[in-house]
Amino acid sequence: MRLTLLKEIPENADLRQQWNALVLRMDQPQVFYTYEWALAVYRAYRATLLPLLFLAHDDRDVLVGVAALATDPAGQHVSFLCATTGDYCDFLSVPEERGAFVELVLAELRKQKIDEVVLANLPADSPTASVLSDAATGQKYHCFARTGYVCAQVLLSALERRGGAKPVLPRKKMLRRFLNAMGRQAPVRLDHAQSCAAIHAILPQFMQAHVARFLATGRISNMAREERQTFLAELAKLLSESGWVALTRMMSGDNVYAWNYGFQFQGTWFWYQPTFVSDLEKFSPGFCLLAKLIEEAADNAEFKTVDLGLGAEEYKERFANRSREILYVTLKTSSVPHYREILRYRAAEFARTFPKVETAARATMQRWHRLKQHLAEGGAKATLGWAGTRLREILWLESEVFFYEWSGRSLPSAGELKLRRLDLSELATATCQYVDDQSTLGYMLRAATRLQEGGAEGFGLVDGEGKFLHFAWTTDFDKFFLSELNAKVDAPSADCVMLFDCWTPPSVRGSGHYASAVGLIAKRVLETGRRPWIFSASRNIASIRGLEEAGFKRRYSLVRRRLMGLQWINGETPSSYKTANQELPAQSEDSAA
């Protein structure tokens, strides 16, 4: 067996043919093992994943082994090339040659001075799992394997049928009721896009829905990243040539309720990346889509299994009648990090049996990560200053908040800038635009939660190309909870509207977007016959300047004081004004206190 190491995925038709022929000789062939999958990963992630492609040939120059691995830019850590995209990853060879091939690859990694190898998503029932420990020991790697996931599956032949009819699926009455509710205008049906052109035409809509759905559940979708979008587009292009990919939509007329970016390969229909419209969550559109997909697969003799993939979601368990264990394996040359990892894993497993212990451990880790972040960003001196300020604020805190009403003066021209009302779809667009900005992503998650809670209206300021430059919200002023005061505040009158939670992404600050946004929102509020107000911390000079530029006038202030946990607020809300544009003298700081 002759081993060749390549640091790219060559675009070679002969390699493609031999590689996929080897996949079909595996005990359980998977679409994730194919040449097309590896090439799509290479095209999309080549900036961060550097391939280490091991090809083994016999004495007749026939390909007998493939190991698609990758290293980080530093070249110190190795993983499966497809570990972040493929639900199953493995060394490719016929089973009887797996041991020799795996040991040959590990020997070459040792020559390359690779100290750590992480093999995620390795099937526990693969021959690789049974030979890996011995091969690792032979190459002086310490091996530790643990369960990573348990993939739920539906064996179609095991589904109950009555009188030769459609399979009996869980919650049949509920399913019928939900499908009827969604299909009032037209019957609910499945539409499968399988050609490259058909998939690419609807892929942006699917990605937008996926990002929006994740925001609604308090998460950031991997589809917000350009690399992931490129990967799915490339994968559709490559797999569609063989009919292995299907972007399924559950529709009623022209309305799309749910999607699944999945695969049809060697008798398996794969539930890979589903999503649905959050507005219809009460009808469980994802559950309905999966039920209809299983029914359709069960009626097609080509399919034996519906694989539900990674993740232990509860709805999958309702359908599953078997499962497949997936391993997370680490190989390390040093014993110290090896046993440290084992200890960390055992401790985490122990903590999970005691919820309170796990919660306390997570909180401690979060505080530790915040401390490390401060150290990395500002150094020891700045971190000590930050810690001292936090301690002082716990003992004694004094903060003043200024309240402003829009004066009604003419706004400066906003040019091509416009306001958009925020919904989950708009937040998804903004998330994709600022996917590398952690502070703005945090704002997006907060905004998504507020949308679902209701009671406030969000706006985004966009330029001519649709890029979001600022975000802000409005709600009733009266009884508005002001976190800076840790209290609810009274409104000067019943027709007052509060602008709050304004945010400009750091990369576009310093261009006056704050003033433009709050000014345009104030104008829109006035058009509804109500009066726009806003507030600012007295120490936030940039905010105060922006408000004055937008035409807001300071009317009064409130001061919060806290001593050893006891709090009181000085100042009063002034009585109702006669008109929204009346110029009132601002109270002095002394009188407000």
Image (cartoon, helix red, strand yellow):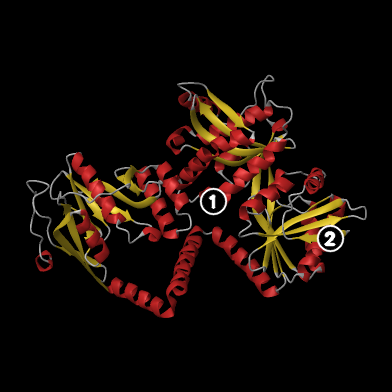
Answer left or right for 446 relative to 344: left
Answer left or right for 322 relative to 60: left
> Label 1 is placed on what type of residue?
Glu
Residue hosting label 2: 3
Q: Residue furthest top?
A: 163
Circles 1, 2 touching at the beta carbon (< 8 Å): no
Q: Residue furthest right?
A: 59
> Label 2 is placed on what type of residue?
Leu
387 vs 400: above or below? below
Q: Residues within 10 Å of mark 1 (few under 14, many from 20)?
A: some
Answer left or right for 100 relative to 511: right
210 vs 556: above or below? above
Instruction: Specify the label residue 578 is tagged with.
Output: none
Answer left or right for 397 relative to 168: left
- Considering the numbered disc 1 on the image, is that residue within a helix, a strand or a loop? helix
Residue hosting label 1: 226
Q: Residue 35 at what x, y percent from top left?
A: 74, 47
Q: Residue 324 at what x, y percent from top left?
A: 69, 46
Structural distance between the alpha carbons of marks 1 and 2 = 34 Å
Q: Residue 391 at what x, y percent from top left?
A: 33, 74
The quarter of the image holding the N terminus is: bottom right
